[in-house]
Amino acid sequence: MDQWVVIIYQTKNGKQPFAVVQLRQDNVIDSLYNIVGWQTNLTWPEQKQIITQFIPGLAKVDIVRYGVLHKNNYINSPKVLNQFLQYKQNNNIFFAVQIIWVEGYLESAAAGLLCALNVYQYVMDLPLIKFPSETVLGALVNYVTNPKQRDLKPMKANLGIMPTLITKFKNKPEKNLALYSRAIKKIKETIKKYQIKL
């Protein structure tokens, strides 16, 4: 089970900033925890000082591994990938997950599943599958493979990358329900079109 620690300390100007630190269990026997999101370029002595002096309850903790920065590498997806996540210069090569500019675990998993599905289709000599841009996955793939894309940035799943609706709505929940209904309809059509077995 995750543990939460609230850090409150007095600053020089008298204000009280605070932070919430999430500790996540890192082993089965519940003796090792990590600080979630602790990706930093702080030196190890600085990290030790922050952990042991500013986080209540961690003053006498044994630090097993310090936080480090990680770097994501990306390919130029709009230039080198087609809408099926297939390398344009060699149809035998497919790409997925964060390297194609999707951001997040769910997004990476979804892109990976679509990629795997298309690898299967390719090997079985079946039509490759493209999800409609009215679905979040289709919109995400469209975003990262659009050759007109000029200012590519890592993208999370969001309704803003989907085509807008023509109808005006009274409120956001009503609009979101309409987007959801349209997406479900398009997914059903895609499943039928490609005869995807569920």
Image (spheres, rainbow, N blue to C red):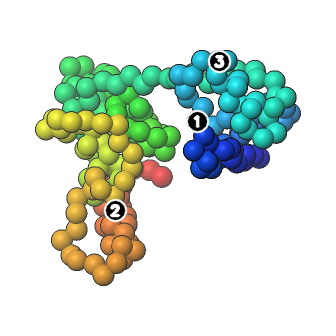
Cα distance between the residues tagged 3 and 2? 48 Å
- Identify the amino acid type marked 2: Ala
Q: Residue at x 85, y 29 (%)?
A: 60
- Identify the amino acid type marked 1: Gly
Cα distance between the residues tagged 2 and 1? 32 Å
Q: Secondary structure at mark 3?
A: helix
Figure check: 46 above or below 160 = above
Examine the rendering and report whether any part of residue 82 can be seen: no
Q: State the mark number for residue 44.
A: 3
Figure check: 36 above or below 3 = above
Residue 37: x, y in percent? 58, 36
Q: Which is more toward the observer, 123 or 91?
A: 91
Residue 102: x, y in percent? 37, 38
Q: Residue at x 22, y 25 (%)?
A: 80
Cα distance between the residues tagged 3 and 1? 16 Å
Examine the rendering and report whether any part of residue 93 can be seen: yes
Q: State the mark number for residue 183.
A: 2
Which of disc 1 and disc 2 is earlier in sequence?
1
Q: Neighbour class for label 3 at 10 Å: few (<14), some, many (≥20)?
A: some
Q: Residue at x 30, y 61 (%)?
A: 186
Q: Neighbour class for label 1 at 10 Å: few (<14), some, many (≥20)?
A: few
Q: Quadrant of residue 82?
A: top left
Q: Residue furthest bottom?
A: 170
Residue of label 1: 37
